[in-house]
């Protein structure tokens, strides 16, 4: 098995948003377990667990909220992850197949903000943890110190991320086991009030559950970034469950965070860790976020590069990757430096906005991939502004906007309270309807008017152009070069582009230009 991504003989990864050639595919499903187990078995999980008790849940109900949020969040992420090996490109580039070449642009920018925002929040936690142990160094200085290894590892890229996470899985697994034993042995133990099973208020429980769901589901916009190098024929079931159980198993750290906060509610999170487990564990918890920060910075680079690719072709280049990593990490450092004094409020509001933006995106992405196109896309067209995904795909965009509109009716956050919140006793169920409604609406449209799912709208030569792609319809045929369709000219007859290698103009070092395929104009002569 290849162990290093060397497009041109370099240990530093060179591919960014490009299709991963068959010759560079490598890895096993178990690699996905270690990536996501270590990413979430970290100080951010500890903090999230603590948050449930700080917000007012007793420990038993905090554990229930953690499990519900982690399980449903992990299911969403695992389904997204299957797109990586199949299509061989980053997660958000795939969104062009659902929303159109330009329609996906807003998600590139939103994901960039998501990733540097998470990196900022995580470096603040690192700074707070180390300031607990070495108080004569400021939180801001520690934030700067931890930014350096994040940049270095993210520049080295995909394989180094996996290497780091394998070792982190071992170290963090042992550490968390020690923390759990120490917490359970700590005297005098839980108070009767903190251990109560008395039912919490529904609004509070739904709020906390939503926090855990979005914290895990927020990996959905980047999960394929870390599965796209897997062989296309990798065992899908094993890959799915490796990711799912890696995330669900990491919930133990959130449970520990809730437990130690319930034990020492006035000590502060890292004060409680220091008291119960000692300063060495606090340091390990700070270090635990290095791998997580690398993941978010790496995807931030991909999202930023994807946004730039909307306007110009992106060549295979280490320089482009390095610049993207530095910009993402720099944005995270600035955000952390400006917001670390009001971290708790800022992070909770940040999660609220993520919930609002990405839940409907997830619903549209998954339905289009699994039920409309059944995993068959023209990978070449992801990079072609004039291809079959050109402009905006009308139905997915409209369905997404409907999802946002429905969320506004049920959202209960600091920045807005929906009109249907009061009849529900203050419960925020926007994250439920924000997924179910667009998913169900897309299903209804695809069932009653399947051809409308392929309508694209774009501006060409100053005029509105409406076209329809038909290759996904039951009586249609996949476009040449489409993943799972007829092989592109020159490809081996073992499958489509994703199986036999990319079309010639997507090979590393080549431009991204493609051709418009599988579409016809509406109200104009067929091309």
Image: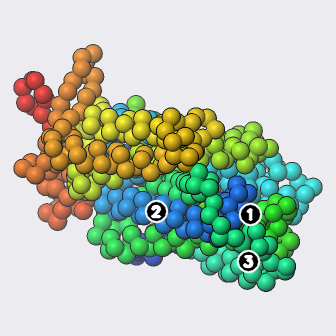
Mark 3 and mark 1 in contact? Answer it, CB < 8 Å: no
Nearer the N terminus, badge 2 or badge 3? Answer: 2
Nearer the N terminus, badge 3 or badge 1? Answer: 3
Please give the residue where the numbered disc 3 appears in the rendered image: 179
Please rate how many residues cluster around mark 1, counting C-alpha atoms within 10 Å: few if below 14, some from 14 to 19, many from 20: many
**Residue 30, how many percent across, how many down?**
45, 76
- Image quarter of residue 327: top right
210 left or right of 447 in image? right
Label 1 to label 2: alpha-carbon separation: 27 Å
Residue depicted at 17% across the width and 65% down the height = 494
Residue 191 numbered mark, or none: none
Residue depicted at 69% across the width and 43% down the height = 346
User: Front-most of 476 and 193?
Assistant: 193
* Badge nearest the viewer, 3 or 1: 3
User: Is residue 402 visible to the viewer in this orientation of the structure?
Assistant: yes
Residue 286 numbered mark, or none: 1
Residue depicted at 80% across the width and 44% down the height = 341
User: Is residue 325 visible to the viewer in this orientation of the structure?
Assistant: no
- Image quarter of residue 198: bottom right
User: Front-most of 467 and 347?
Assistant: 347
Secondary structure beneath dot 2 equals helix
- Image quarter of residue 281: bottom right
Residue 72 numbered mark, or none: 2
Nearer the N terminus, badge 1 or badge 2? Answer: 2
**Residue 239, how many percent across, how many down?**
39, 71
Residue depicted at 27% across the width and 26% down the height = 458
**Residue 192, how many percent across, how many down?**
77, 73
Relative height, residue 455 to residue 25 (above, below): above
Secondary structure beneath dot 3 equals helix
45 left or right of 499 in image? right
Q: Quadrant of the C terminus?
A: top left
């Amino acid at each position: 098995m290849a162990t290093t991504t060397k497009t041109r003989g370099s240990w530093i990864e060179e591919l960014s948003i490009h299709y991963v050639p068959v010759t560079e595919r490598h890895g096993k499903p178990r690699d996905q377990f270690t990536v996501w187990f270590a990413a979430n078995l970290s100080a951010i999980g500890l903090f999230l667990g603590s948050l449930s008790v700080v917000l007012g849940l007793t420990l038993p109900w905090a554990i229930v909220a953690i499990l519900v949020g982690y399980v449903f969040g992990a299911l969403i992420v695992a389904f997204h992850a299957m797109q990586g090996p199949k299509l061989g490109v980053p997660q958000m580039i795939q969104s062009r197949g659902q929303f159109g070449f330009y329609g996906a642009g807003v998600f590139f920018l939103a994901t960039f903000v998501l990733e540097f925002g998470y990196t900022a929040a995580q470096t603040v936690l690192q700074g707070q943890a180390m300031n607990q142990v070495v108080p004569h160094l400021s939180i801001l200085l520690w934030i700067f110190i931890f930014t350096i290894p994040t940049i270095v590892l993210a520049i080295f890229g995909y394989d180094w991320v996996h290497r780091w996470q394998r070792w982190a899985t071992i170290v963090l697994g042992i550490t968390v086991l020690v923390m759990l034993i120490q917490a359970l042995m700590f005297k005098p133990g839980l108070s009767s009030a903190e251990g109560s099973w008395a039912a919490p208020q529904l609004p509070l429980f739904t709020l906390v559950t939503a926090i855990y769901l979005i914290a895990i589901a927020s990996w959905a916009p980047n999960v394929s970034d870390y599965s796209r190098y897997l062989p296309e024929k990798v065992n899908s079931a094993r890959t799915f469950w490796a990711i799912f159980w890696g995330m669900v198993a990491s919930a133990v750290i959130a449970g520990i965070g809730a437990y130690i906060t319930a034990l020492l509610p006035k000590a502060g999170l890292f004060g409680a860790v220091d008291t119960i487990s000692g300063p060495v564990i606090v340091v390990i918890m700070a270090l635990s976020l290095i791998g997580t920060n690398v993941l978010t910075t790496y995807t931030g680079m991909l999202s930023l590069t994807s946004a730039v690719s909307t306007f110009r072709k992106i060549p295979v280049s280490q320089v482009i990757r390095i610049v993207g990593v530095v910009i993402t990490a720099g944005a995270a450092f600035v955000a952390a430096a400006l917001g670390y004094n009001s971290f708790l409020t800022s992070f909770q509001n940040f999660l609220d906005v993520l919930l609002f933006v990405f839940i409907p995106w997830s619903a549209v992405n998954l339905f289009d991939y699994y039920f409309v196109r059944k995993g068959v896309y023209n990978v070449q067209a992801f990079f072609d502004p004039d291809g079959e995904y050109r402009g905006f795909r009308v139905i997915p965009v409209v369905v997404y906007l409907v999802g946002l509109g429905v969320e506004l009716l049920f959202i209960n956050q600091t920045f807005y309270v929906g009109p249907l919140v009061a009849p529900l006793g203050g419960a925020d169920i926007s994250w439920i309807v924000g997924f179910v409604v667009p998913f169900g609406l897309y299903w209804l449209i695809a069932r009653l008017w399947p051809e409308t799912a392929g309508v694209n709208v774009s501006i060409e030569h100053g005029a509105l152009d409406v076209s329809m792609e038909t290759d996904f319809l039951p009586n249609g045929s996949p476009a040449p070069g489409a993943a799972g369709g007829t092989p592109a000219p020159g490809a081996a007859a073992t499958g489509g582009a994703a199986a036999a290698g990319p079309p010639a103009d997507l090979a590393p070092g080549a431009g991204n230009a493609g051709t418009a395929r599988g579409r016809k104009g509406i109200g104009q002569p067929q091309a």
